[in-house]
Amino acid sequence: MSVLRRNSFDSAAAASRCRRYRRRVLEISRRVGALHIATAFSCTEIVDAVYHGLMRGSGEGPDSFLMSKGHGAIMLYVVLEDLGVLGRADLDAYCTEGGRLGAHPDFGVPGVAAASGSLGHGLSMALGMALAERVSGGGGIVHCLLGDGELQEGSTWEAVATAASLGAGNLVAVVDANGFQSAPWRTRDSFPAFYPLGAKFAAFGWEVAEVDGHDGAALVAAVHGRRGDRPLMVVAETVKGRGVSFMADSTAWHYKVPKDDEYARALAELEEPA
């Protein structure tokens, strides 16, 4: 599923959508025992920008999106629900017996390009899709969302080197650089040699842009402004748990659900401004 590229990206409309997406994730959290809330909140604006500012429809492409950081799948599902690709009943049955939506994306679910969640595989699959588009003359651009903890997988760097070597200019990758791994430590502490991230990808031959990952307009502008002769890596600086003050910048909310009082506080913080 893709949507038509907009001539301009409406930041106010995007902010409203993203508050709605986060509220929907919280609503779903009331029916499941645990949920990757904080990781979904860190990539909210990125996924929104891909679908509302970057993806082109069948009349122009179509383009594709692959979520390599599969534990953020709930945000992809919520955006697809908002676009009418998935139904409300699908989301209401998330991670329940008989439901078709699991914690990680499964190929065959409408709007899901590939199964992911085994970290380090997504960029290789996205590269294969991009090369297939080039061979077939389809003209599609493949967008791939990575996590920064996922960059510790060697297969990711094999894909990075191969994509640049093959000149995959129709591959656009975004790193959700929220600075955390699932375990309670920061990526800068566990793998300091990764930093600065942008310089690493540039050294492998990628075009690189660095943006505020919660500024959809900046992300869209960076992708639209690329040269297109090489793959593009957008390093998007984000905050894990963004949108809810007590979830922000905390690994504690990587995989758990809010209590009643926490749920009420979170919803209050995500209300539309007067």
Image (spheres, rainbow, N blue to C red):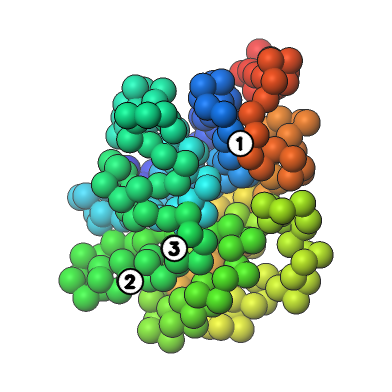
Q: Would you name the residue on which mark 1 appears?
A: 37
Measuring from the top left, give residue 87's x and y in whole percent.
32, 26
Q: Residue furthest front?
A: 97
SS class of the residue under badge 3?
helix
Q: Residue at x 61, y 84 (%)?
A: 203
SS class of the residue under badge 2?
helix
Label 1 to label 3, Cα distance in Å?
A: 21 Å
SS class of the residue under badge 1?
helix
Residue 104 falls left or right of residue 59 = right
Q: Would you name the residue on which mark 3 appears?
A: 122
Measuring from the top left, give residue 206's x and y in whole percent.
52, 77
Q: Amino acid at mark 3?
A: Gly
> Looking at the image, is 241 positioned above or below residue 55?
above
Q: Amino acid at mark 1?
A: Ile
> Looking at the image, is 85 positioned above or below residue 208?
above
Camera-side mark, 2 or 1: 1
Measuring from the top left, give residue 114's x and y in whole percent.
34, 55
Tell which of 247 and 44 is nearer to you. Answer: 247
Q: Residue at x 41, y 39 (%)?
A: 102
Q: Mark number for residue 128?
A: 2
Q: Earlier in the sequence, mark 2 or mark 1?
A: 1
Label 2 to label 3, Cα distance in Å?
A: 10 Å
Q: Earlier in the sequence, mark 2 or mark 3?
A: 3
